Amino acid sequence: MKKYICIIAAAILLLTSCNIKKADKADDASLSVVATIFPEYDWVREILGDNPSGVRLRMLSDSGVDMHSYQPSPADILDISDCDIFIYVGGESDKWVDDVLKTPENENMTVIKLLDIMGDNAKTEEYVEGMEHDEEETEYDEHVWLSLKNSVIFCDAIADALIAADPSNADTYTENAASYTEKLRLLDDQYEKVVSEANVKTLLFGDRFPFRYMTDDYAIKYYAAFAGCEAETEASFETITFLANKMDELSLSSIMTLENSDHRIARTIIENTHDKNQDILELDSMQSTTTAAAEGGASYLAIMQSNLDVLQKALQ
């Protein structure tokens, strides 16, 4: 937190000591949108479509480091101060945003905070049987984008913000948002179908567990080594034993991990099962997807489709 305070103080000093970026902005009539993470960035990209008014779109967490490790630079904070629409999740990982938005430069921007849009539907991280528990204060589960149902709501809010800021292109944004959210709903229907026809209704994660919104959407039960994106990396003997026994009890043929996992905990759990031959499957939480990946074809919809394919195999 002290590092964040120093970064924010440096950025505020830059903002108050020079007007270079603001002067540039005056000469550039196009809108600027800053999104903190990939799903937000991709939703905006889809709603902009061909981007008739040349909206400038930037994703902050774009180094391949996930949102929980992201630290804003003074340049990042300057970009926020210069934008018209700022989109962020608003959970524990975004605590630094509160101070940034207090600066006078940010008084007139439109701010979209996903957890505020969720309202009473926002969930706290939960601790299920067998999970490591650090006894710290329970926090909101930040991973709201991993629900297709939530994503429809978020896209509607983003479209409304773009329309309010750029009414001359309202029809384009409305049509693009309607077309895109229909695709999200159709994929949501596919998830419903796959889960309803599945032989298994339980997932077991030898990893952190950011998929609560997804599993709750489809009434999938889960067990995991850690809640949410818990910082702990070592699972206790008790947790390993519990999860291994649970795999045996439920006759699960696979164990789940996150993208970029080293699979170490998952392999240890498998080694303590009776059969010791379960598959390791990965679900992508999109916490480290970059704009370079997006330019290479990655998209929120494609990743959620891929997650469905993995889910279907896990629930066989």
Image (spheres, helix red, strand yellow):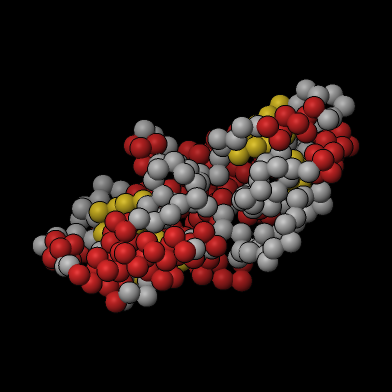
- Residue at image x 37%, y 52%? 60
Q: Which image quadrant is residue 80 in?
A: bottom left
- Relative to the observer, which residue lies in front, 83 or 202? 83
Residue plotted at (25% across, 54% down): 56
Report the number of numbered marks.
0
**Does residue 1 appear left or right of residue 266 in this picture?**
left
* Residue at 17 percent of width and 67 percent of height: 18
In the image, what residue occupies the spot 82% across and 40% down? 237
Q: Quadrant of the C terminus?
A: top right
Image-based side of 263 in relation to 300, left or right: right
Q: Quadrant of residue 234?
A: top right
Compared with residue 134, is residue 295 higher up or lower down, i.e. above or below? above
- Residue 164 in view: no
Residue 296 in picture, x, y percent from top left: 36, 33
Q: Residue 66, position in %: x, y?
A: 49, 46
The answer to whether any part of residue 224 appears in the image is yes
